[in-house]
Image (cartoon, helix red, strand yellow):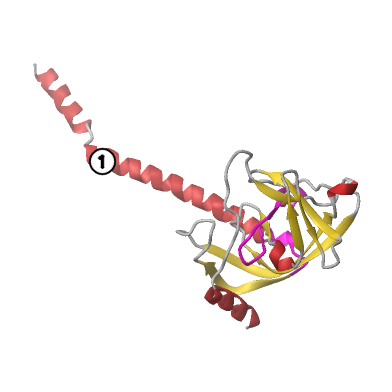
């Protein structure tokens, strides 16, 4: 009888309360969240580096509206100035409840296929100025309104022309949007998934624009 009581007593001593289980679960979740955050930060840091493996660069240049061009990778820029201090875009269309970091501003040169009429055989270089470097973006954004070209759209493709009416770029449907056709069909990293809807256009407020370019002028 004494042995049985002692065994029961030991069993009761090793039983854990609901609060203890909850604390352990919270600790495990916090550890997992921290690991995920570290992985995201590490990936973002990689995207701000000058050198990239070609397979890691994103070549998805999606046609967007809004009021700016943006690029995901530092390696996409031919001329670049890093932001001297951490600058956040608070009023972004990707997710109005989150902030996006602008890591820098610069020039991007894109060699694109001119027109679908010759099967993309002829090419042209688009020079995009004041492109925002946003490492957290899921792709790159090309705003044809900022490039100053006219645009015609149909179901199969969109095409942009210069002031003389000569075609300078075309884009085809991709992942619910429209993607520029790059010369040479470079292959890299894509985060866009077919069949999923994305809101890719980016608008920044006049105040955010002033903060970005005032910081660059320092």
**In this orientation, which residue lies closer to the viewer: 88 or 85?**
88
Task: Spot the residue most to the top.
Answer: 1
**In this orientation, which residue lies closer to the viewer: 213 or 198?**
198
192 sits to left or right of 112: left
> Can the viewer see residue 206 in this picture?
yes
Give the image location of residue 178, x and y in percent.
69, 49
Locate the C terminus and report the quarter of the image it occupies.
Answer: bottom right
**In this orientation, which residue lies closer to the viewer: 217 or 193?**
193
Secondary structure of the residue carrying tag 1 is: helix
**In this orientation, which residue lies closer to the viewer: 208 or 8?**
208
Task: Spot the residue most to the left.
Answer: 1
Task: Spot the residue most to the bottom.
Answer: 218
Give the image location of residue 211, x and y in percent.
56, 77
The answer to whether residue 193 is above or below residue 60 is above
Q: Which residue is mark 1?
A: 20
Q: Is residue 78 magenta?
A: yes
Looking at the rendered structure, the number of numbered marks drawn on it comes to 1
Name the residue: 59% across, 61% down. Answer: 202
* Range shown magenta: 53-79
Where is residue 86, by image quadrant?
Answer: bottom right
Locate the N terminus and report the quarter of the image it occupies.
Answer: top left
43 sits to left or right of 75: left
The answer to whether residue 194 is above or below residue 9 is below
Q: Is residue 157 magenta?
A: no
């Amino acid at each position: 009888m004494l042995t049985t009581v002692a065994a029961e007593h030991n069993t009761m001593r090793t039983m854990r309360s609901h609060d203890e289980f909850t604390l352990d679960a919270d600790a495990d979740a916090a550890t997992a969240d921290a690991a995920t955050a570290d992985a995201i930060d590490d990936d973002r840091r990689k995207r701000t580096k000058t050198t990239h493996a070609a397979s890691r660069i994103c070549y998805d240049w999606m046609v967007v509206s809004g009021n700016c061009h943006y690029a995901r990778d530092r390696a996409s820029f031919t001329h670049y100035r890093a932001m001297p201090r951490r600058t956040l875009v608070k009023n972004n269309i990707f997710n109005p409840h989150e902030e996006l970091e602008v890591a820098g501003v610069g020039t991007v040169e894109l060699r694109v296929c001119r027109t679908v009429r010759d099967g993309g055989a002829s090419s042209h270089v688009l020079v995009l100025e004041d492109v925002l470097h946003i490492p957290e973006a899921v792709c790159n954004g090309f705003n044809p309104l900022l490039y100053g070209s006219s645009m015609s759209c149909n179901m199969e493709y969109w095409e942009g022309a210069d002031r003389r009416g000569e075609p300078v770029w075309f884009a085809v449907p991709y992942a619910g949007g429209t993607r520029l056709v790059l010369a040479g069909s470079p292959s890299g990293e894509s985060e866009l998934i077919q069949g999923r809807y994305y809101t890719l256009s980016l608008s920044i407020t006049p105040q955010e624009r002033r903060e970005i370019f005032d910081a660059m002028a320092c």
